[in-house]
Image: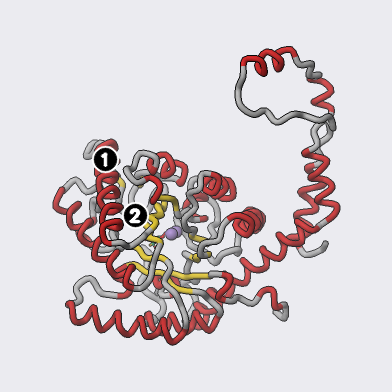
Amino acid sequence: MGNDNYKPKPEHKFTFGLWTVGNRGRDPFGDATRPSISPVTIVKRLSELGAYGVNLHDNDLVPIDATAAERDRIVREFKQALDDSGMKVPMATTNLFYDPVFKDGAFTSSDPRVRLYALQKTMRSMDLGAELGARIYVFWGGREGAEVDAAKDPRDALKWNREALNFLCEYSIDQGYDYRFALEAKPNEPRGDIYLPTTGAMLGFIATLDHADMVGVNPEVGHEQMSGLNFYHVVAQAIEAGKLFHIDLNDQKGPRFDQDLRFGSESIKNLFFLVRLLESSYDGPRHFDAHSYRSENEEGVWEFAAGCMRNYLILKEKARQFDEDKEIQALLAEIRNGSGEEVEPLGAYSREKANNLKELSLDRAALTSKPLPYERLDQLTVDILFGVR
Ligand code: GLT
Ligand code: MN
Ligand code: MN
């Protein structure tokens, strides 16, 4: 515990959703196991632990049936808590899944008036987020899905979803909010199937939007793992596309229901590569979308929050060790060196280049015989992660 490198500080940009540490342990089979914690207390305790900020849905802070006066009082007190602690709200989002009105979706509900209600609720929530200083706006379409494919054509759902996002991009521009939208995928749960089930599907959809430049992704570790995908690869593609606008960090035991476990508690090697990638190529908030085990009380919740940040910083330290390890760097150089002969970068197509390439002498057997010391490299990585190197 004594290593100062593992001490979270605001400069690390660690954030938590109000709904994460505020999670009361409810699941589909059982009721809450711990009392609720007020947003003001959450802000105070997280700041003491070294976090940078909190993120919220509209109704994490303001109850859905609050009067205008109640809303103003709640927001005033919350802003005071933020000011007192120096905590930020970098991201906001809308709860478009809890209220029964969204039983068949929000932006993709078959009922056009529910779709209008979802837009109205989102605009109001964007107003709230902007008031709190948020510049990232997340869309997680938890109810945007189906069980009965006879009921809805997925192409209609996509069109309605696109229409809504186009409208909301214009709203953000019109109000001068300067939001960047981040779309979050999940394959299923609570719906049998959720539309746009992976971050890759989101990236394809984003390209069809009117303001594609304003819209990126918010991948979540567990959501991609539910589909059996390699989260490191998912995030790498988003970064390479210039679309990693936000990230939801947590952990998961394989492709099952969404577990939202403490970051770094399960998928250690995959998350090591993730942290190494984020540290070199992403400067946005490191947001934990996870919650404590249902068996914990409030003290356990703060243990959980501290553990998420600590594990990130441990993996960051391991990444530094990996990058500074001479043997590892020598192996990487050897692996990338190919046959050792100088090769020109491929570059743009030309007919001459194509003709030359067709004539180039490439010895298949010699290429095959080149050793690739991946066993050694991977074992050195594991040695680092196990702390024996
Ligand atoms: C909900 C969901 C998360 C989303 C949140 C944003 S809410 O808890 O499970 O993955 O990121 O709407
Ligand atoms: Mn999430
Ligand atoms: Mn989740």
In this picture, residue 221 sits left or right of residue 276 = left
**x and y percentages locating residue 243 in the rendered image:** 48, 49
Q: Residue at x 15, y 48 (%)?
A: 112
The residue that appears at 54% across and 46% down in the rendered structure is 234
- Answer yes or no: disc 2 within 8 Å of ligand 1: yes
State the residue in front, 15 or 253. 15
Please state which amino acid type lies under the numbered disc 1. Lys
- Of marks 1 and 2, which one's residue comes earlier in the chain? 2
Residue placed under numbered mark 2 in the picture: 142
Quarter of the image with the N terminus is bottom right
Closer to the camera, 343 or 43? 343
Answer whether residue 329 is visible to the viewer in this image: yes
Ligand 1, seen in the image, is in the quarter at bottom left
Q: Position of residue 186 (x, y in %)?
A: 42, 50
In the depicted structure, whether residue 190 falls above or below residue 62: above
SS label for mark 1: helix
Amino acid type, callout 2: Gly
Residue 189 horizontal side relative to residue 235, left or right: left
- Give the x, y percent position of residue 342: 81, 30
What is the secondary structure assignment of the residue under circle 2?
Answer: loop
| Residue under numbered circle 1 | 159
Q: Nearer the viewer, residue 30 or 118?
A: 118
In the image, 13 versus 25, the foreground residue is: 13
